[in-house]
Structure formats: C-alpha cells, structure tokens
Image (cartoon, rainbow, N blue to C red):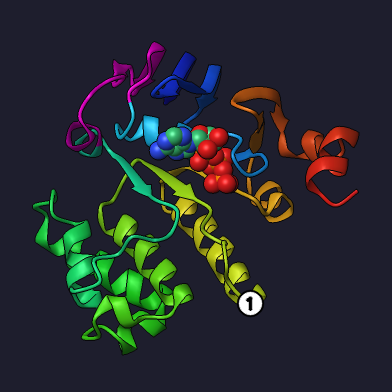
Amino acid sequence: MLKVENIDVFYGNIQALHNVTIEVNEGEIVTLIGANGAGKSTLLKTLSGLLKPKKGKIEFLGKSISGKAAQTIVKSGISHVPEGRRVFSNLTVEENLELGAFLRKDKAGISSDLNKVYETFPRLLERKKQLSGTLSGGEQQMLAIGRAIMAKPKLVLLDEPSMGLAPLMVQTIFKVIEEINNDGATVLLVEQNAHMALSVANRGYVIETGKVVLSGPSAELQSSEEVKLAYLGG
Ligand code: ATP
C-alpha cells in the first residue's frame, strides 16, 4: 500500500533521514520506534507532504506521492495525527471533528462516523461545545484521533499518540488504534512506548539517527536483545 524507497530528507544542510526504505501493507499496523531525534516525525511529515525528500521514491496505492502537496496527499487517503495534537483551539470539539470530514460528501457516513467517535470517546460527546484549547492534554489527543477518524482515511499516520498521557488513557488510545485498524484503516504508528507499540503492531522498524537499523515482525523485535536493551528497558 505504501512504499518508501531510499529517501533522504534534509532540514537545510542537516540530513535527518538517510536512505530510508519502509513498506506498509494494507490492513497492517506498522510501528516506527527509535530514540528522541531519530527521525520518526520527520518520516511521517515527509509522507504527508510537509517535507519533501531530496532523493528516493514514495508510492501510495501504486501512485507516486513524493514531493506532492499535502492537500493532494490527504485527498489520496492519508491522514496525519501530528505530535503535540494540534487541534484548532478556537473551535469547539464538534467543529474540529466536522473539519476532519471536510473532504467528504457522504452526509450519512459523516454523521455515523461522528457517532462512532462519540461512542469511542464519550468524553468528547460531553464536551462537544467546549473550545478545544481548553481541553486537557488527553482530551486533545482523543480529539486529534477523532478528527483523523472523521477523514475516513485509508492510512493513518499517528505520531506519539500516547505521549504525556496517564497510563489508563494510554490503554484507551491503544485500544482505539486497534479499533481503527479493525474498521479498515491501515496504521503507521510512531511511538516512544515501544512496549505498547510492539504489542499492537504486526511489524516494526527501528530508526536510529535517521537510518533504519532493524525491522521485522513485532514478535521478532520484542525478542531481539538489541531492542530489549535499547527500547524495552532491558
Ligand atoms: P522525537 O521522538 O524526539 O520527536 P523523532 O524521531 O521524531 O524524535 P525528528 O523530530 O524527526 O525526530 O527529528 C530528527 C532530526 O531532525 C533531529 O536531529 C532534529 O533535531 C532535526 N529536526 C527536526 N525538525 C527540524 C527543523 N525544523 N529544523 C532543523 N532540524 C530539525
């Protein structure tokens, strides 16, 4: 479904990704794990068109999307939930959710997905008229994920959805990731919480200083000594 081949990405003169190759198949949950600054967010931003690769190819559903505008990439079915949530603070919860669906025309589908989001996150229903900027961190994270669901994407890019959340909320978020996947979306998940990420993902890639250093089925990565030492607390 998504093929990334040998991409290099720079911030000015600084190279953040070196010859990165990854693949995501339809229906999978794939995780990218790595330390702070490894380049995980950079890779997601490149996939959603916020950064352009200097070299290499990106194909989504058989078509090249490398260097395409972010709007074009959203239209092709990729939805990005960035790190730090980025909800529209001056809009209400419901307005944010409606914005998620702005490219859709199927009114009935939109309204049924809105109900689904409220069922998944009852807290958002209680607060649908509240300005999003006044939500707690965890609530904003739910909203950011809800907004992505509203776009009905084929592929969701999730950047550190569990960051800064209380343990119970982390569990909820991971459950929702599995639900989104069961509902038909393919998921590419960036996480610092490698333990949780590998427990929901089919496969993973380990990124270090802008390079893919290891990849494989989650079970294989979970039992790798290297991964255990560096990312699973020994
Ligand atoms: P984290 O988990 O800390 O968010 P990450 O793996 O997502 O880390 P990136 O945010 O992709 O890492 O950063 C990769 C490298 O690129 C880092 O060295 C970072 O300092 C650098 N970088 C990121 N954004 C910029 C920018 N706008 N300008 C210059 N360098 C940047």
Pinpoint residue 182: horizontal percent, then vertical percent: 48, 52
Vertically, is 119 above or below 220?
A: below
Q: Nearer the viewer, residue 183 or 171?
A: 171
Residue drawn at (50%, 29%) of the image:
24
In what quadrant of the picture does the N terminus appear? top left
Q: Is residue 29 visible?
A: no
Residue drawn at (63%, 44%) of the image:
36
Q: Is residue 189 magenta?
A: no
Pinpoint residue 179: horizontal percent, then vertical percent: 49, 59
Location of mark 1 (residue): 168
Specify the amino acid type for callout 1: Leu
Residue 230 in which image quadrant: top right
- Dot 1, how many residues are within 10 Å of its Cα: few (below 14), some (14-19), or many (20+)? few
Vertically, is 69 above or below 150?
A: above
Q: Is residue 7 visible?
A: yes
Q: Nearer the viewer, residue 152 or 184?
A: 152
Q: Of helix, strand and loop, which one carries label 1?
A: helix
Start and end of the magenta stretch? Answer: 52-73
